[in-house]
Amino acid sequence: MSASLPVRRRRLVLGTCCLSLFIASLDNTVLQIALPSLRRELAAPLSGLQWTIDAYTLVLASSFMAAGALADRFGRRRVFMIGLGVFTAGSLLCSLAPTLTTLIVFRMVQAIGGAMLTPVAMSIVTDTFRDPAERARAIGVWAAVVGLAMATGPLLGGLLVDAAGWRSIFWINLPIGLLALTLTWRFVPESRAGTPRRADPAGQLLVFALLAVLTYTIIQAPDRGLWSARTLWLADLAIALLITLIWHERRRDQPLIELRLFRSPPFTGAVVIVLAGFGTLTGFLFLNTLYLQDVRHLDALHAGLWLMPMAVMTFLAGPLSGHLLARHGPRVPLLVAGTGITTSGILFAFDGQAHALSLMLGCAVYGLGFGCVNAPTIHTAVSGMPTSRAAVASSLVSTFRQTGGALGVAVVGSVLATRLTNTGDVHADTYLDAARPTWWIITGSGIAILTIAQLTTRRPHPPTTTAPPATGRSATNQRPLPHNEPTQR
């Protein structure tokens, strides 16, 4: 059993799983820095750039829960290895894409493999580290990997794009994916849930349709018109799909989305914070990448260097948030997260992009805030589930993470396109004025994180020398599950 693994083996398992998160996180970071180069070579409009990101995140978001259920039934190690193989092959296909359309299709193939990585790897980690304090530290390392990917992504992406073009950004996934595949085969033990859930293909289809229609509606609104008949019809369709999904899931004994979990305020707060936090991340990168390369006319490498303060602070904030989480519970790191994102949004709303010092300061403050999002939200959601449902909990959190990322790019890109003099013309002299409403949206997301953290987490208690009672639940200020949630036997 994974619980009896020696310390060295557990660390190898954690390191192997973190490699999957690294390439999945690096992929979007590197792609963001390559967007202007990709746009020029493939003649992609602004909406096309949005779809190169959102095609990937949409498939991820709609497939995470199914991947978690497959891992519970057929084995987490097995599904994880399949995911690594598909993701690596998809990366190779993306590097060979001849057109924007084929690139978007290959990004979807890549996402099918990616959906088997992050949530399944998290369930492996939570099954390997059973002690609450040890698990909190492991999740802190996990969160720091996001920062590491961001710290290397802008600079590495800039080097690759300047040296060999945007296609080279997908090459970096090949050796890392093969290394992770080898380490998984060698060191990761097999595990599965005792009572895996039945498949829910109708629910899976409804989730994908809902996210696709919602994202398409937002991205196409600048071209069609916000109040056009087509936009309103698509919005009505998205609402109808949401109602149908809820109705369908409530009728199933083993639903794809366990709606009863949302009766727990900490769990609901965690997934909403993930949605808001990762929405600001993709919007932040999208805005700054276009500004630095298409308005300031920097090359990809120098644009990556300007984003380094954000990346470095995100990397440093990961372990810090894990320490704060283990010592004080989720409230303190979440308050830091909300404060950093809000402060950065306000700074950029007042033309912070236009001045070198404020641009660097805003990036650093945002990095501190975003770096404190991952660990407390993952820990809150996963600790609120029995160990046998670790894949379900982590896949649901991952779904909201990717949904937030897709909506962040869609909303920010559409607002920017609507405000520019010529739709999609990021060279316009009015760029800073056009971007201002998007920064207020990011500010509002930061305020939402602050508010939800206050409402759904308990106040931290001073640390004591008395050990907490031995239970199967985390001792970091978690509230109990809803009364009808199954417990670990």
Image (spheres, rainbow, N blue to C red):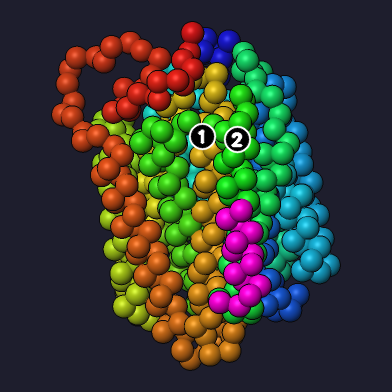
> Looking at the image, which residue is at 44% across and 78% down?
435
Where the N terminus falls, by quadrant?
top right
In which quadrant of the rendered view does residue 227 lie? Answer: bottom right
**Image height check: is 119 above or below 361?**
above
Q: Residues within 10 Å of mark 1 (few under 14, many from 20)?
A: few
- The disc at residue 474 is none
On whether residue 277 falls in the magenta region, the answer is no
Q: Amino acid at mark 1?
A: Leu
**Image height check: is 337 above or below 82?**
below
Q: Which residue is under mark 2? A: 249
> Looking at the image, which residue is at 51% across and 39% down?
397
From the top left corner, tell me how far across and down residue 205 is, in percent: 71, 44
Q: Residues within 10 Å of mark 2 (few under 14, many from 20)?
A: some
Q: Is the C-beta separation of discs 2 and 1 under 8 Å?
A: yes
- Tell me the distance, in whole angstroms, between the alpha carbons under discs 2 and 1: 7 Å
Give the left or right position of residue 164, taking residue 137 as reference. right
- Magenta stretch: dominant secondary structure: helix
From the top left corner, tell me how far across and down residue 370 is, in percent: 39, 52
Give the left or right position of residue 394, taking residue 68 as reference. left
Specify start and end residues of the magenta stretch as a single range.
227-240
- Secondary element type, mark 1: helix
Q: Which residue is under mark 1? A: 259
From the top left corner, tell me how far across and down residue 62 is, in percent: 64, 45
Q: Amino acid at mark 2?
A: Glu
Q: Nearer the viewer, residue 278 or 285?
A: 278
